[in-house]
Each structure stands twice: as C-alpha cells, then as structure tokens.
Image (tube, rainbow, N blue to C red):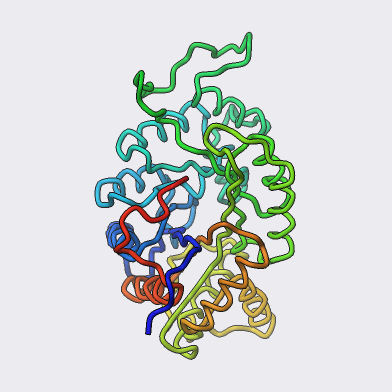
C-alpha cells in the first residue's frame, strides 16, 4: 500500500559524484539520467552544487551541468545549490543564469553561497593572482542584484551595463529567483533583508536547533520582494535509503572514508563500498567517521520517512532537498525512488509544486 500523497515538496541536490574507476563523462551521464528519473518521480527542484579541486565530485561549473539538464527535462526547477559568489564576477553570474533561464524559461533558481566551496589555495587560484574579487560578499551580492534587475544605485560606476541576454518587453524577466544558502544565522538575516528564499544546509550543519532558529529568524524579519511575496524555506539533508536498514548502513560506508580524506586534504575519487570496508581505520578515525554520521539520515523507507517528516516539523521548512552520495548510480536512483514512494510523491500529477 503506497503512502498518501505528500504535501511536502521534495527536491534533489546533486554533487555529481565520480566513483573510483569511473570518469567525469560517465558521472555526468548518470546525472542526466537521475534528473529525468527525479522528474518522473515528482521531485520539485534539481540543484547542482559547486565544488573545486575534488576528484570525487564533477560539478565544478554548475551552470554547464544545468544547461545540459535543461534539455532533458521539462518540469523540474533547475538551480545552483549554489554558486559560491566570492569565486566569480557578479556580471558573469548574472549573464550565466540569465542565459540558463532563456534555455529553461520559468524553471531556474539561483542559489548563492559565500563559502569558497574548496580549500584556500584553490580559492585564491579561482579569484586570480591579483585578488580582483576580494570584495565583501554583501557588495558582490548588491552588484549581482543590480546586474540582474537593471536597477543600479544612483552614481554606480557600472550603471547602464546590461547583463545579456536582456529581457524582452512584455515577457517575464530572465533573472531567476534568488536563494541564499546558510549553515548559520548570517544567511538567514541576509535572505530576510533582501526578500530571497532561504536554503539551510543541514547536511553541513546537522544541528536541527540551528536550522529551526535560522528559519524562525528569517520568517520574523522577512521583507517581501517581487520574486518572493512570502518567505520560502528549504532544508537540505543527506539521505541514504535502501530496502533494509542493514543494506543502507553498508551503503553509507563510503561517506565516512570520503569525509576522512577531505579532512586530510586528500584529492581522490568517491570511494566504493568495498574500498570503505577494506580501509584500515585507526580508533581515532573510526571516531571521526562515527561523528560524521550525524549529518546523514540512513535507513529503510519507513525509518527515512519518519526522520524526514520530523526534520520538516522541527525546523518549519517548506520543502526538503535531499542529497544522496552513492558510488553506484543505479543504487542512488533507487534511494530517491524509495524516498519518493515512502513520502507519497506523485510524479504523474501534472503541474505539482510548480511555484518558486
């Protein structure tokens, strides 16, 4: 017996994992297939995260991946989860996501973060030797908004510069709705002030208390905007679902090894289950892996359903976004399918969850 239809939109955050023995071309093909399956299952959004200097993840330029996704989907909202704004010139971001909106009209989101999405040395390389982008996040964000909307403060040195492609008179703007990413209170305050959506990264900061506090603060201070007349929140969570709890635990093993490698600054592909099980963990490393598991919801469909519904209730989120890192693409798709069934997504309902 299937679950009743879910009133809670579910979305996908894809880090585009590149497993051991596989290259980026295969990983990207798997992402295209997963997006099509997510659309069929009734997921609402499909966001791609920006990471650099990581052999385990392929999405260094989310806009390129999203452009490909726009051609194989028709209903999913597509977005960056997110663009790490300090790495980019605001005009370049405005143009990339205006162009993406022209490819997928009315289906694009622009999530923005202020972390580098990489280590310090790589961040410096991204920003150039001259440090031309070493500006406060607030200033970059204001400049991006000016390029996106065409509304510059009086006397702005770049007033009159048009972010291409330009809007067409009588047509909806190509500049997509903005979401600010947050794993603390800062993003919530900025999102409320600017009237953007708020995406809390609970897969990074596992504290449900912090997520709930950020969402409360955002709602209390929210200033309506054209794109968001009302506050809108989502919470991103790491999830691994399998038919049995025992299999789900096995599938979660690579996450622990990947976490260890990241803490040591190692650049390596995403490990397989066999690699993770064969790794000779020290007692200290086992403790680190156990602590990292706080970030992940692991279990069979009923257990995952219970925890996700509790997460939504405890945080007050309008929507949950699930990231599932697994080396086997078919098993990753199955995890999303099991969650969709457990929470009663209805992929056949045309037009479901179409608002921003």
Residue under the point 34% across and 21% down: 168
Using the rendered view, name the quadrant where residue 350 is placed. bottom left
Q: Nearer the viewer, residue 17 or 83?
A: 83
Residue under the point 57% across and 38% down: 229
Q: Nearer the viewer, residue 80 or 216?
A: 216
Image coords of residue 263 (percent x, y): 62, 65
Q: Quadrant of the N terminus?
A: bottom left
Residue under the point 49% across and 26% down: 148
- Residue most toward the top? 155
Q: Is residue 46 above or below residue 294?
A: above
Q: Is residue 116 above or below residue 242?
A: above
Q: Is residue 299 above or below residue 81?
A: below
Q: Is residue 264 visible?
A: no
Q: Is residue 133 visible?
A: yes
Q: Is residue 89 above or below residue 298?
A: above
Image coords of residue 71 (percent x, y): 25, 46
Image coords of residue 17 (percent x, y): 41, 63
């Amino acid at each position: 017996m299937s679950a009743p239809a879910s009133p809670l939109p579910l979305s996908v955050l894809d880090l585009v994992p590149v497993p051991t023995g596989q290259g980026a071309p295969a990983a990207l093909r798997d992402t295209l297939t997963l997006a099509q399956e997510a659309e069929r299952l009734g997921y609402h959004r499909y966001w791609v995260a920006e990471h650099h200097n990581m052999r385990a993840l392929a999405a260094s330029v989310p806009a390129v991946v999203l452009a490909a996704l726009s051609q194989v989907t028709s209903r999913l909202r597509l977005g960056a989860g997110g663009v790490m704004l300090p790495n980019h010139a605001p005009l370049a971001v405005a143009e990339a996501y205006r162009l993406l909106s022209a490819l997928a009209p009315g289906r694009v989101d622009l999530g923005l973060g202020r972390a580098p999405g990489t280590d310090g040395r790589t961040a410096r390389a991204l920003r150039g030797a001259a440090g031309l982008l070493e500006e406060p996040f607030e200033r970059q964000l204001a400049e991006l908004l000016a390029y996106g909307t065409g509304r510059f403060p009086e006397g702005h040195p770049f007033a009159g510069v048009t972010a291409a492609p330009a809007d067409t008179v009588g047509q909806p703007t190509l500049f997509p709705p903005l979401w600010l990413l947050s794993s603390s209170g800062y993003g919530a305050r900025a999102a409320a002030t600017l009237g953007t959506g708020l995406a809390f990264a609970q897969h990074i900061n596992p504290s449900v208390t912090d997520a709930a506090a950020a969402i409360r603060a955002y709602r209390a201070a929210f200033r309506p905007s054209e794109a968001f007349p009302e506050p809108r929140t989502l919470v991103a969570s790491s999830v691994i679902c399998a038919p049995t709890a025992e299999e789900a635990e096995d599938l979660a093993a690579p996450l622990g090894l990947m976490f260890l490698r990241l803490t040591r600054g190692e650049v390596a592909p995403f490990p397989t289950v066999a690699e993770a099980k064969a790794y000779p963990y020290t007692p200290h490393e086992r403790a680190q892996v156990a602590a990292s598991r706080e970030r992940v919801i692991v279990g069979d469909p009923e257990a995952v359903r219970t925890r996700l519904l509790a997460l939504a209730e405890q945080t007050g989120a309008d929507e949950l976004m699930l990231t599932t890192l697994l080396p086997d693409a078919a098993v990753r798709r199955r995890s999303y399918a099991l969650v969709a069934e457990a929470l009663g997504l209805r992929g056949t309902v045309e037009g479901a969850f179409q608002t921003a």
